[in-house]
Image (cartoon, grey):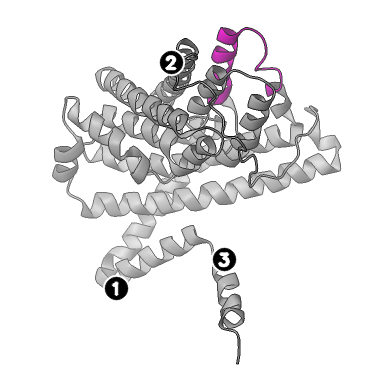
Amino acid sequence: MTDLSTTLRPFGSAWARIDKVALTGALIVLTLALFDAPEVVPTIGETLESFAGTLPYILFAVAAIAVMKASGSERLLDGAFTGRETRMIVVGALVGGLSPFCSCQVIPFVAALLAAGAPLSAVMAFWLASPLMDPAMFAITAGGLGLDFALAKAVAAVGLGLAGGLTVKLMAATPVFADPLRSQPAVGGCCKARKLTLNWRFWQEGERLRIFRDSGWANLVFLGKWLMLAYLLQALLIRYVPAELIAGVIGGDGFGPIALAALVGAPAYLNGYAAVPLLEGLLAQGMNPGAAMAFVIAGGVSCIPAAVAVWALVKPRVFAAYIGFAFAGALAAGTIWSYMA
């Protein structure tokens, strides 16, 4: 008798090779063709037009990440977490807001910092700021939501890191932050590339050129597919969701829309890049600007990849504090931005 698992294994392997983002986009277009065929071509046209407008920012972001990887400029972070604790908190927040780490790279990096004796306050500052902003995120946000929004988000990322780090420093002796690490923290990650020595003239070495090419292509595919899907959803949102409904739920003035956006930030957050076109569409439909800021701050810090990086290393009470910092920071950033926008 044939083993069922052996029979099904080829189907599982084929499913694993399918790009789920591309599949989702194709299914959306197919569904639209079945229920409203005349709108397929205009929707695809709007999607491509929006994507073309963002393409220069995508290419800049891809090039910036590839240069950092190939040159080994991540080495510049090695000395960031040394010295006085307050200085480390400030540097941790600034580095977190500028570094190109993805969520899986944060885990081994932070585990190494904690193992080396870096204070939890400085690590928390880095943790809170890191998922919110990096060079690629800044470029995409500026292209979709405007330079002022991108700058405000960057300031909010650093401010959240500073506030969280300083709070942990002041409460270091309390039961919440005493003995914060798990007994055997998970330090693995999906990013296996080793850290190179610093050499800005990366084009002079074949291995570094290969890293530049491979990193550039991988990030171009990643950003391209997510933003294409997001612009498709944006086109559908504007076409089928009444502006009055958006304005009624998360529009208008007051604290309510900001709090609601902060609450739904984590479960509704796809990733930082995909969120930009969706927020662009929601703002066009009447979303409160403060709610948009609260959404990206709460969603960025507490989304699954970023939260898993924290959960893997610290005890639940420290993780709860991390989520609390994210929500409080989102409310503060959203409230401030609602008055400034």
Of tags 1 and 2, which is closer to the observer? 2
The percent coordinates of residue 221 (x first, y second) are: 58, 51
Q: Is residue 120 visible?
A: yes
Please identify the residue farthest to the right as the structure is shown.
205
Of tags 3 and 1, which is closer to the observer? 3
What amino acid is at disc 1? Leu
Q: CA distance from mark 3 to mark 1?
A: 27 Å
Most common SS among magenta residues: helix
Residue located beneath label 3 in the image: 16
Out of 130 and 28, give the one closest to the viewer: 130
Q: Secondary structure at mark 3?
A: helix
Q: Residues within 10 Å of mark 3 (few under 14, many from 20)?
A: few
What amino acid is at disc 3? Ala
Picture residue at 55% right of the left edge, 49% below the top:
222
* Vertical arrangement, residue 341 with respect to residue 250, above or below: above
Out of 242 and 129, give the one closest to the viewer: 129
Q: Residues within 10 Å of mark 1 (few under 14, many from 20)?
A: few
Residue located beneath label 2 in the image: 163
Picture residue at 27% right of the left edge, 68% below the top:
38
Q: CA distance from mark 1 to mark 2?
A: 51 Å
The percent coordinates of residue 159 (x first, y second) are: 44, 17
Q: Quadrant of the C terminus?
A: top left
Q: Residues within 10 Å of mark 2 (few under 14, many from 20)?
A: many
The percent coordinates of residue 318 (x first, y second) are: 46, 28
Q: Tell which circle, 1 or 2, labels the residue nearer the N-terminal end.
A: 1
- Kindly identify which numbered label has been placed on residue 34: 1
* Vertical arrangement, residue 234 with respect to residue 174, above or below: below
Residues under numbered marks 3 and 1 in contact, where contact means CB atoms less than 8 Å apart:
no
What amino acid is at disc 2? Ala
